[in-house]
């Protein structure tokens, strides 16, 4: 299954919230580059990767939560 990026953030709070929402929806995901110490220090982004067949659902969830514009 191909993994595609649907969102990126440098905010550890956003990452924690998104993980909890996706876990509750039983969606498989991976935050590439996630390491809160490195994110804040380097201003780097963690990239949210999801299976391509779940990408549209994840985008809808992120829109509902206010992370993506509709």
Image: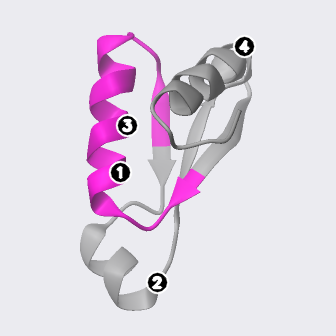
Question: Residue 55 in the image: x percent, y percent?
Answer: 68, 23
Task: Between label 4 and label 3, give the one nearer the viewer.
Answer: 3
Q: Residue at x 47, y 39 (%)?
A: 30
Query: Of all residues shown, which one is farthest toward the bottom?
Result: 41
**Badge 3: residue crowd in 10 Å (few <14, some 14–19, many ≥20):** some
**Within the image, what quadrant is residue 69 found in?**
top right
Please give the range of residues in magenta. 8-30
Q: CA distance from mark 3 to mark 1?
A: 6 Å
Q: Residue at x 46, y 16 (%)?
A: 27
Residue tagged 1:
14
Q: CA distance from mark 2 to mark 4?
A: 30 Å
Query: Quarter holding the N terminus?
Result: top right
Question: Residue 38 in the image: x percent, y percent?
Answer: 34, 80
Residue tagged 4:
53
Asked whether residue 20 is drawn in magenta, I would say yes
Helix, strand or loop under label 2: loop
């Amino acid at each position: 299954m191909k993994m595609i990026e649907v969102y990126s953030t440098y905010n550890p709070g956003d990452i924690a919230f998104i993980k909890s929402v996706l876990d509750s929806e039983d969606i498989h995901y991976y935050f590439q580059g996630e390491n809160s110490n490195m994110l804040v220090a380097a201003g780097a982004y963690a990239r949210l990767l999801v299976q391509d067949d779940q990408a549209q659902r994840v985008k809808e969830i992120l829109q509902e939560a206010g992370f993506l514009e509709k």
